[in-house]
Image (cartoon, grey):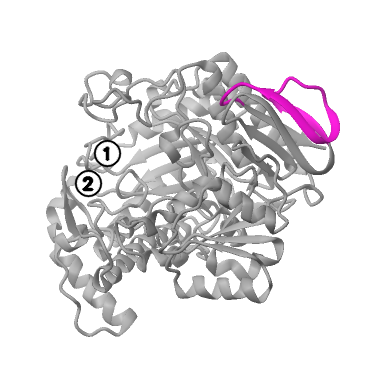
Amino acid sequence: MLSSCIAFKNSKPYICVDSGIFVPMAYTTYFEELGEYSDFIAAGYRIFFVNVSFTDLPINNVTGFSPFRTGVFEGDKPDYSEFDSTVRRIVAECPDALIFPRINIAMPRSWLGANPEETVTTPSGRREALWSDLFRRDGAELLKTLVEHIRSSDYAENVAGYQICGGTTQEWMHHDLAGSYSESGLKKFALWLKEKHGIEKAPEIKKEDLTKNGFSEEVSLYCEFCCEMAAKTVEHFAKELKSFINGEQIVGAFYGYHAFVNDCLTGLLGMRFIIDSPYIDFFSSPCGYDANRQLGVDWGDMIAARSLRLHNKLYFVECDIRTYLTRRMQDSRPGEYPDGAYLQVDSNGNKTVWHGPDTSELSLSAIRKAYAHQLTNGNGIWWFDMWGGWYHDREIMAELKLMKEIAEAAKDKNTAEYPRAKTVLFVDEKAYLNNPRGSDCVHSVNVIRSTAGNTGIPFDLCTVEDAEKVIGNYTAAVFTAPIPSESGKKALALCESRDVPCLCASVEKPFFTADEIRKFLISCGVHCYNADGNVIYCGEGFLAVHAAEGGKIVINLPQKYKVKPLLGADIPECETNKLTLGMDKHGTAIFELV
């Protein structure tokens, strides 16, 4: 059996398997029959996430969408055929493949029917409640049954770790997006209130209270309960799995959205409850869907990635980048899905987030931009080819091969002497509980983070609870919560005591423009690489630019470096502190500082 862990080399996290260090770059797809495994194997990829589910019930309870044709535990006996055949297909072509089962912990129909008090109503039927102790107990037993099969299979020596998923869209959101609201859930809430807050009599909370805008202390407490229950359910399954495999392999969770999602009722804002957990080695979320994934803007992180690294975790980012080859899922599996689900063009003729760029060139630029963001932040990537075939293009695969090689070559790169972000944006997760629902205040984190991506000044995302550990590394700080939590207030006071200048969102001014953020940071002495609205990434010894508009772009470096073009730039290697480029609109170029 392979052993694995997260190992840090030159301050960056890697996957260590039997003492070998592997760059965290992987491939996965929902539609395995259309997966481009051969292309990625030929490009040097060895890590593959393979999906498997306890049930074939929907992963999205609004659209009714499920990628799974077989639920392992839906029949009289377990059916592992869908998962086994995919893994064997990969291993047959790539004997040294490292497989990460991506397990959807969702209860089968028989369990839901037998335990209605442990479920919640959704548009597509009743589903398990994330606060349910019975779900945790029985789900863990099914998890162990599945993993026992995997560990006793003919491909067991290729399995290097696991990712646990669940809830709506497998991202550990409550299935009803309302905290698994039910009569049983309110009883659980009452017990939690007494144990955690010493509140003897729980307030009455009606379903309609959860749709009202504004601040309510009762709803705020319920929101805290929603997030803590979801987070602790994630940790429970991770702990049970870690124990079952004797801690021999890494376990990750698809959880954490506190720099993007603003509704606590989803349950996604509980990272602080589990960030220290010894049972979770990596966290995953997609690169941002900012501005409906339009080009010309940063697609930032949904998690405070700097804090993950502080807590010895890997941020394994889902890069589900649409391309000119992306087609409707209904066309990928004809006859299996209703025409109205996941539209590429809406009823008004507007392109949705499911529509890729129109050309191969722009598709390459989008992939390059997502890669550059993670490369310069030292994060992992798994390319999520959702419906299959999105990257089946010779030029795209040639670049994905080069990207893997660039990351491999950087393993031995000591980046201490190279530029890094001197600005920190603080994420105050618990402040969501203070800010009025539906107001601009709850959108401030996402808006400020997204806007800061076009200032021409790189930044790190960190939670306020980690301010003491990081503040000495930064010249300036931006606080994104208009009504901070107690931890947020302490972090701000710490910055003030250390004479670190701070830009703070407020109720009166919850957002800032890119010009306002840039002007403030420059006044603090933070270096600006480009002030023309382009996206600039710089870190880990690499530099990248994504052009908001076409034409001449000048990048000012903090000092003279040897600049080596890697992708997207046809210029000679040079030693300079001022890089002048001619770029097409929405082009992306990546350089190494050597």
**Label 1 neighbour load within 10 Å: few <14, some 14-19, many 20+:** many
7 lies above or below 22? below
Inspect the image, locate mark 2, and give the three-letter code of the amino acid beneath it. Answer: Pro
User: Disc 1 marks which residue?
Assistant: 71
Q: Earlier in the sequence, mark 1 or mark 2?
A: 1
71 with respect to 478 (left or right)? left
Task: State which quadrant residue 409 falls in.
Answer: top right
Residue in the foreground of this view, choosing between 315 and 536: 536
Residue at position x 20%, y 66% from top?
Answer: 185
Q: Quadrant of residue 178?
A: bottom left
Q: Which residues are magenta?
A: 562-587
Expressed as whole percent of the image width and height from the top left, the position of residue 158 reads 54, 38
Instruction: Give the Cα distance between marks 1 and 2.
Output: 8 Å
Q: How many marks?
A: 2
Can residue 95 be seen in this snapshot? no
Label 1: which secondary element: loop
Is residue 481 rendered to the left or right of residue 307? left
**Relative vertical location of residue 247 with respect to residue 34 in this rendering, above or below:** below
Please tell me which residue lies in front, 177 or 582.
582
Q: Is residue 452 left or right of residue 82?
A: right
Q: Which residue is mark 2?
A: 108
Callout 2 crowding tier (Cα within 10 Å): few <14, some 14–19, many ≥20: many
- Identified by mark 1, the residue type is Gly
Residue at 24% x, 60% y: name it: 213
Compared to residue 520, the image places residue 196 above or below, namely below
Q: Are marks 1 and 2 in contact (CB under 8 Å)?
A: yes
Residue 2 picture location, percent across and down: 58, 46
Q: Is the C terminus in the top left, top right, bottom left or bottom right quadrant?
A: top right
Write the residue at 30% across / 63% down: 226
